[in-house]
Image: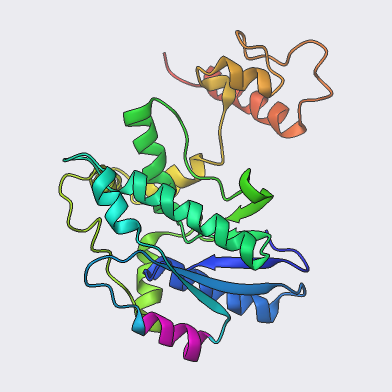
Amino acid sequence: MLNDGDHIMVCVSGGKDSATLLYLLKELQQRLPVSFQLTAVHVDQKQPGYNGTSLVQWLEHDMKVPFHVVEEDTYSIVVDKTQDGKSYCPVCSRMRRGILYTTAMKLGCNKIALGHHGDDAMETLLLNMIHGGQMKGMPARYTAQRGNLGVLRPLIASFEEDIAKFAQYKQFPILPCNLCSNQANLQRPQVKLLLSTLSSLNPNAKRNVLTSMQNVRPTHLLDTTLREACGLDPITGQISQGRQSEVSDAIGAWMVQEDNDDENTPL
């Protein structure tokens, strides 16, 4: 994720996740053998009751990193464009993302670091499955088309509970979000509750769900396009003729394991 000469814009929302992210990246900056620059960026979206003083003081006096506060009244637009009973989050996140991409390019950054964690990834996966009919979560690293910016999620393998404990221990300043917190019947809190109930089935359930997102078996899913992309026959799931050299040893190894597992599965 990190390379020599990187200029990383760390998106600091005022929440526990992004504060933890900035703190840990600064620790890595001092310990890793590669040299990279950090710039923190916070977007003041002009929400009612907003006061970012504690965050600015923390950035300036405690973290001592270069930072920018971008002032954009997205609040009024989000409230105006969102239908009654609908979540503010889709419009808000798209607008904030556009502001962040623009800011990163102005600052000359080549990468953006976001504070999404493992719980965010699992919740997004379930939301897309339940409401969109897609198995789509959050990648740890991708390249944004706009500006060819590298987008990083260094906390993607961490759990929200652990981050919350760390943020409390470090006494990071936390700014409330008065936009989302005032809405009822949001889908993400409901999916968060669904994930928490899985622990009653298996105490390692959440860890296993997160692990499964990087342990996919195309032969045992129904997506024929995915099979083809992996060099497999879209119907049978076997390695396609003429593509043996393209298929990685890892895929071949787990195909053998799956065959053995299937033979030992009771009918």
How far across and down, in percent of the image, does residue 193 sit?
24, 48
Quadrant of the snapshot with the C terminus? top left
Q: Across the whole image, how many numbered discs are drawn on residues?
A: 0
Q: Residue at 30% of width from left, 58% of height from top?
A: 75
How far across and down, in percent of the image, does residue 67 sit?
54, 77
Q: Residue at 48% of width from left, 83% of height from top?
A: 59
In the rendered image, the vertical position of residue 161 relative to residue 192, given as above or below: below
Quadrant of the snapshot with the N terminus? bottom right
Between residue 1 and residue 143, name the one nearer to us.
143
In the rendered image, the vertical position of residue 95 relative to residue 21, given as above or below: above
Between residue 116 and residue 222, name the one nearer to us.
116
Between residue 206 and residue 147, name the one nearer to us.
147
Q: Residue at 56% of width from left, 41% of height from top?
A: 214
Between residue 250 and residue 103, name the one nearer to us.
103
Residue 259 falls in image quadrant: top right
Q: Residue at 25% of width from left, 43% of height from top?
A: 82
- Is residue 55 one of those drawn in magenta? yes
| Residue 172 visible in the displayed image | no
**Magenta region, mostly helix, strand or loop?**
helix
| Residue 183 visible in the displayed image | yes
How far across and down, in percent of the image, does residue 206 sit?
38, 48
Region rendered in magenta: 54-63
In the rendered image, the vertical position of residue 220 relative to residue 8, given as above or below: above
Residue found farthest to the bottom:
61
Image-based side of 17 in relation to 178, left or right: right
In the rendered image, the vertical position of residue 189 relative to residue 220, given as above or below: below
Residue 125 falls in image quadrant: top left
Image-based side of 43 in relation to 146, left or right: left
- Is residue 34 one of those drawn in magenta? no
Q: How is the image coloured?
A: rainbow
Image-based side of 207 in relation to 65, left or right: left
